[in-house]
Image (spheres, coloured by chain):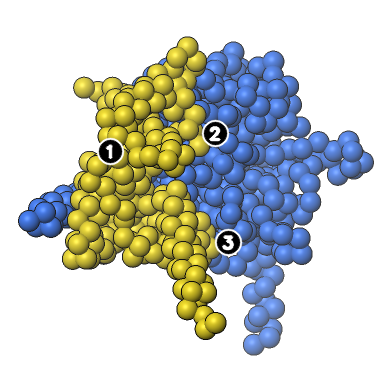
Chain colours: A yellow, B blue
Amino acid sequence: MNASMINSIMQTLALIELSITCAVVCIWMLQKLSPNPLPFAVKIFLILLIGNILFWPLGMDLPLVAYVRGITGDLSIVLSLLLWSSLLPSHKPAPIAFKFAVVIIALCFYPLALGFEMIDPYAWGYGSIVFLAAVLFFALVCGLTNWNKGVWIIAMAIIAWAAHWHESANLWDYLLDPFLAIWAICACIGVLYGRKRDKARSGYLFRPG
Amino acid sequence: MSRVMALCFLLLAAVIGFLHIDSRPVWAPFAVTPIQAEEALDESVTTKNKALVKSSVATPQTNWLPDTGAPSVHAASLMTLNDGAVRAFWFAGTREGAADVSIYSSVYDTKSANWSAPTVVMDRISAEKGLSRYVAKLGNPVPARLPDGRLQLFFVTVSIGGWAGSSISSIISDDEGITWSNPQRLISSPLLNLSTLVKSPSIAFTDGLMGVPAYHEWIGRFGEFLRVDAGRVIDKRRMSSGRNAIQPLVYVNDTQDATAYFRQTRSAGLPKKIPVSHTQNAGQTWQQSEDLAIANPNSAVSGMALKSGARILVLNNIENGRYRLVMLMSDPKVGQWQMIEVLEDDEALPDAQRKEFSYPYLITVDGNDAHLVYTWDRKKIRHRYFSGPWLKQAFAKLQVEAQVQTQEISPTRQEAQ
C-alpha cells in the first residue's frame, strides 16, 4: 500500500469521524429541544441517518462534512470522544473540575501559542517528554478522582497521536481544540451562574420577614 | 475494577507515547554548501578585482513569465531542475484571492532563454478534492527539493476569510513537476490550523529533513521555523513574536548558525526597517536582534547566497509603497549591504501612475548566477537573469570598495595613536 493510498484512506476516515461528531451535535441539539429524552435506538438511527447525509456528496462536488472540515479541521480526540460518549445510556456529565482545568489550560495556552511571546507551548506537543508526562499525570488525577471515562479518553488521544491518526503530529491537537475550550468555558459560566441563582433563591426563602 | 482497567490502558498509552517520542529524529545541523576557496584580501586579489571591475560583462537579461490570460498574477517562485532548467510557479486569476485563481508553472530553457507554455499545477477544485475539505482560494506556491530528489511544492489554501485564514498544504512530483501527487495538509497551528503561510525557500538539514520558514499573520504576526518530514510538520520553533514580522528569509551561516530577515508589519510610528532574528543551534531557538538598517515598506524580501560567499537581497528599499525594487549585495566578512542594481524605479512618476514591484524570489542554478522573478504591477511576472560573471564583477567591486574604506580608516587610526 503506497503513501498516496494510505493518505486517501486516512482522509476518508477523518470525514467519517467528523460526520459522526456532527451527527452527535445535531442529536444533542434535538435533545435540548425535545421535552423527553430520546431513546438510545433512536439516537443510533439518527447518527446513521445524519452521518450518511453529511458523508456522501449527494451530487455535489464535496460532501457536506467537507465544508465543515474546511472550517474546523480535525477536531480533537478528547472532544470527539466526549461527544460520542454522551449518547451512551450510562452517560454522566464530565466533572466540573475537568471543565475548569480545560478553561485554565486554554486561557494560558492559546495566547502563547498564537504568538503573544517567544515561548510556544504548542511546540511541546511534537515530542516533549515532560509535556507527555504532564498529560499522563492529568489523566491519572482524573482516575484518582473517579472519572474513569476521562482516563480512557486521554489514553485514546495519546494512542491516536502516536499512531498518526489525524494529519497533525502534535499531541495538543489530539487533546484540545477551540470548541472544547468554548464548551468548557460555557459550562463553567453555567455552573457559576447556577450557584449565584441558587444562592439568591435561598437568600429570598430565608430572608427574615 | 473499572478504574484499574482504565489505569492499565493509560499505562499502555504512556508506553506507546514514550516509544513514539523516542523514535523521533534528533534535531540535526543545517546542511551547508561549502563556499569556494576563500581568498585573502591581499594585494594580488585586490589587483585582480580591480581588473575585473573594469572588464566588460553582459548586462542582465530580462523577460516575462508566459501569459496565462488571467488579469491578476502574483507570488512567483523558482526551482532549479535536474537538467539545469528553471521551473517557475505563480498564481493567476481574475484577482488575488478569487475562486478561479490557480497555481501555474512554466519551465525556462536556459539555452534558448525561453519560457514554456504555462500549465496548471493546482486549482481550487483539485485542492479541495485532494484535501477532503472546502477550499475557497489558493496562493503562495513555494517549491523545495526533497533529499530523495523529488520536487515538493508548498502552497497555501484558505477555507474562510482572508489570507490570515491560510493553512499550508504540499504536493510532491516524481517527474520534475510534470505530474503531482494529491495534496497533503500541514498542521502547524492549534487554532483550527488557521494562519500559517509560506513565502521563502526551505533550508535543508543534514538528516534530510527540511526547515520551512513560515509565518502567522492573524492575531499575531510572527515567523515560525517548521521542521518538515515530507508532508508532515514534526516540530516547529518560534522565530519572532508579537505583530511585527512576517515572511522570514533565512541565510545559513554555518551548520548551527543562521540569520533570518523579515518583512516588517509594524504599526505607524514604529521603525520601517527589516526585523532580524538569529539562531546558534540550527534553528532550535531564535533570538530577535537589532533591525537591519534597510528601509522596508511592509513588503516581501528575497535573498540567497552564492558559492563565492556573496549574499544577494532583493527588496523595496523605501518606507512606503512598492514602486522601487533594488538588488543589494553583501560580503558576509564585511557585513555591509550595498546596492548593485536598481531593478525598477517609478519614483519620478506621480503617485497614481506608480506601479507595484513586489514579491521577489531568487535562486541560483550553478551557485554563481541568479534568476529573479517578481510581480510587475500585479499584471505580469518579470524574470531577470544575472550571469555569474556579472555577479562576480559586482562582488569584486564590493570588495575593492571595502578595501579602499579599510585603507582610508587605517591611516586615520594610526594618526590618532
Residue B230 picture location, percent across and down: 34, 36
Residue B171 picture location, percent across and down: 42, 28
- The residue where tag 1 is placed is A165
Element marked by disc 3: loop
Mark 1 and mark 3 on one chain: no
Q: Quadrant of the N terminus of chain A?
A: top left
Q: Nearer the viewer, residue A13 or B143?
A: A13
| Outermost residue toward the bottom in this view | B417
Q: Residue at coordinates 65% horizontally, 68% vertically from top-left?
A: B407
Q: Residue at coordinates 47% horizontally, 60% vertically from top-left?
A: A190
Mark 2 and mark 3 on one chain: yes
- The residue where tag 2 is placed is B159
Amino acid, disc 1: Trp
Residue B137 picture location, percent across and down: 58, 29
Residue A69 picture location, percent across and down: 45, 33
- The residue where tag 3 is placed is B242
- Residue A47 in sight from this viewpoint: yes
Label 3: chain letter: B
Amino acid, disc 3: Gly
Describe residue B299's horizontal placement relative to residue B367 as left or right.
Answer: right
Q: Nearer the viewer, mark 2 or mark 3?
A: 2
Element marked by disc 1: loop
Mark-to-mark CA distance, 1 and 3 = 32 Å
Mark-to-mark CA distance, 2 and 1 = 22 Å
Amino acid, disc 2: Ser
Q: Residue at coordinates 52% horizontally, 83% vertically from top-left?
A: A208
Element marked by disc 2: loop
